[in-house]
Structures are given as C-alpha cells and as structure tokens.
C-alpha cells in the first residue's frame, strides 16, 4: 500500500489558495477519516461511581434551587470526548437528575428523545403526554421526541434518576431545540398502558385495527423486568447472557429510534463475554457488584455505578458475588446504527 501525500508535500501557495476558497484536499486526511480495520475512538472506558456523584448531586440540591436549574442534572461526561461536550459515548448523553420533595421540573418538549431510569427514592413521577407515570427504582420511563413531559416528587427523600438522551446526535445534526409549556392536564387514567399491556403476546384487540402506536407503552416497571430476567435465567446456559430488550409491544421494534435499552442479569459468579459490536453503550448497575473489563481496562462496579463502553470494544463482565445475582441496565446506540446500515457484530 503506498504512502499517502501529506499537507506539507503541497506548495504553501497552493494550500493557501485552497483555504481561501473553502476547499480541503482529502488525501492528507483520508486515513484519519477512514482508518483501516477499526475506527479511531476517543471514547474512554470510564466508570462513574455513585458514591462520587451522590454527594455532589445533593450539594447541587442545596446550591441551586429547581427554578434556577429547570432540570437539576449532573452530566456523566466522557473525558476522551471533552467534558464540555456532555457525551458519555459519541451518541449517548447520560445525566443524573435530582428532584427533592415537593419540587416540580416544568413542562417542556424537545426534539431529542429521552428515557429516565430510576436510581433511588420513592414518590417521583413524570407526566408524559398527559399520562402520569410513577417512578420507582429501576423503572424505565420513555419521554420520546416531541412529547410534553414534566417531573414531580410526592414522596419525602431525594429522588434520583438517570437520564439517557440521544442529544449528541440530534445536536450534531443541528436539530436540537425545546419548547416551554404550561403544566399538563393529567388524564383520568394514569399509567393506563400498564393495563393495556400486562403480558407479552397480548395486546388490546382494538390495536390490530389502527396504525401501530409509536409509543404505546411508556413505563416498564422494574419488578416485571427483574422477574422476567429470573425466568429467562432458568432456560439460559451459564455464560450465555441473560438479557431482555425493551421493545414496542405492538411492533416488536426497539422502543426508541436512536438508543436501545436492555436489562442484563448475571448469576452469582457468572462471567459473560458479549460478542464484540460496533455500537457504543452505557451500563448502569441496578443491583449487585462485579467487574467489567472494557478494552483491557478494569472497572469495579457496585450498585448505582455507571460505565461507558466505546464502539467496537472487547467486553467481559463478571458478577463477583458468589451468592447474589447482579442486574445491569444497558443503553446502546444499536438502533441508530442498524437504521444507518452499519451495525455489526464481530464473532470471536
Ligand atoms: O428531564 O427533560 O438530563 O430536558 C437533559 C435535558 C433531562 C428532562 C436532562 C432534559 C431533561
């Protein structure tokens, strides 16, 4: 393979003449743009300890009233991507949001899609499109692009949840914006989707006769996810991932367009080595403790910790407890990569 010409190979006068006309020669940058074999990755395998986040989040609760924050969030930023860019991975925004007793985070909508995954506390809720959705630990709440949403807290102790947004992509496309709104009228059937979709394989008959709902199910209670994982574990060989994807119950498709969500159970002492994939991911620990080795970097995690997995990374995850299961929540950008036609898996 021949060496490509560099910028310095070109006469200064020629280079300046290009710059002047907003032109750039490709060949000096070609290999950086299209590296051989594996993408150039700046994303680091980072671990954010909840023990580091929590006290700082509580301090934010004292320093910044909700009116001054709109959303009181500490963003989990990957240092490899530049902290100010607020990316956990190139496509995944992750924040930890705090809401205190009696507070409300005002109604708005925006072009990025978001989900909430509850980390601690009781009595939080989000109103999405008029539907009031309770939030308990591990519950997943969808707030899709363009739908009104506001948060509140009717309990006593602090409520914290993880926000996952496709903001980096929407922002990069210069399509990110929001609209403020008045408080929503809450409909008289709160959380109705819980009664529409009680068991997989059963959907309301009337749903067959209308266009498929884009977001028919907006809350996935953790207690159901956890028991479903335990059931799946009984028919899954040790070492094979016990993993469930959150999907649209009317279509079977991933429940959001850009980011995908799944839950993983590791049995006591179990190690899983997921197939290497082109998607990046962020994992949040719901329960348990263990170790992830991501591209050779050891990350020792406990409950509520969060870590980033770059694209194309080699991953090994171990539950280090010999007695208790571990449960992880995964956010990845596989749905977007699939739609764009370049999602890949690389069997060992
Ligand atoms: O709760 O609506 O972490 O709009 C970032 C942007 C949370 C939210 C974030 C948001 C929200």
Image (cartoon, rainbow, N blue to C red):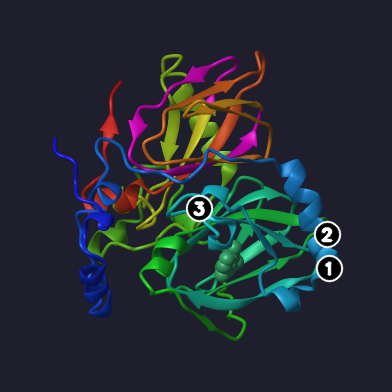
Q: At 64% from the left edge and 51% from the top edge, which residue is drawn?
A: 118
Q: Determine the secondary structure under disc 2.
A: helix
The label on residue 59 is 2
Q: Determine the secondary structure under disc 1.
A: helix
Mark 1 nearby-residue class (10 Å; few <14, some 14–19, many ≥20) = few
Q: Quadrant of residue 60?
A: bottom right
* Front-lying residue, 161 or 234: 161
The boundaries of the magenta stretch are: 266-288
Relative to residue 238, is residue 20 depicted above or below? below
* Residue farthest to the left, as pictured: 1
Q: Position of residue 184 (x, y in %)?
A: 58, 80
Q: Mark 3 points at which residue?
A: 81
Q: Name the residue under label 1.
A: 63
- The answer to whether mark 1 is within 8 Å of ligand 1 is no
Q: Nearer the viewer, mark 3 or mark 2?
A: 3
* Front-lying residue, 206 or 179: 179
- Asked if residue 127 shows in the view, the reply is no
- Asked if residue 156 shows in the view, the reply is yes
Q: Distance between the residues labelled 2 and 1?
A: 6 Å
Q: Is residue 66 found left or right of 181 in the rendered image?
A: right
């Amino acid at each position: 393979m021949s060496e490509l010409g560099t910028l310095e190979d070109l006469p200064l006068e020629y280079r300046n003449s290009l710059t002047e006309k907003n032109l750039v020669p490709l060949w000096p940058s070609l290999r950086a743009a299209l590296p051989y074999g594996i993408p150039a990755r700046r994303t680091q395998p980072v671990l954010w300890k909840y023990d580091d986040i929590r006290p700082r989040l509580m301090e934010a609760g004292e320093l910044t009233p909700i009116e001054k924050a709109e959303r009181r969030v500490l963003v989990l930023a990957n240092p490899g991507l530049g902290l100010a860019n607020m990316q956990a991975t190139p496509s995944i925004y992750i924040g930890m949001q705090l809401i205190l007793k009696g507070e409300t985070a005002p109604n708005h909508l925006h072009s990025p899609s978001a989900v909430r995954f509850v980390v601690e506390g009781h009595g939080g809720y989000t109103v999405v499109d008029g539907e009031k959705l309770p939030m308990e630990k591990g519950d997943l709440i969808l707030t899709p692009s363009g739908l009104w949403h506001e948060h509140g807290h009717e309990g006593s102790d602090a409520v914290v949840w993880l926000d996952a947004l496709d903001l980096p992509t929407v922002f990069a496309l210069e399509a990110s914006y929001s609209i403020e709104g008045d408080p929503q009228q809450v409909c008289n059937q709160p959380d109705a989707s819980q009664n529409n979709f009680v068991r997989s394989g059963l959907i309301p008959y009337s749903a067959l006769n209308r266009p498929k709902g884009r977001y028919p199910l907006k809350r996935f209670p953790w207690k159901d996810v956890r028991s479903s994982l335990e059931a799946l574990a009984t028919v899954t060989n040790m070492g094979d991932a016990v993993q469930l994807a959150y999907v649209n119950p009317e279509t079977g498709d991933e429940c959001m367009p850009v980011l995908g969500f799944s839950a993983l159970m590791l049995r006591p002492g179990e190690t899983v080595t997921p197939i290497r994939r082109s998607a990046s991911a962020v994992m949040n620990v719901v329960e348990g403790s263990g170790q992830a080795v991501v591209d050779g970097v050891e990350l020792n995690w406990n409950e509520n910790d969060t870590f980033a997995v770059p694209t194309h990374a080699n991953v090994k995850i171990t539950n280090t407890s010999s007695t208790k299961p571990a449960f992880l929540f995964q956010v990845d950008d596989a749905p977007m990569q699939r739609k764009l036609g370049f999602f890949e898996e690389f069997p060992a």
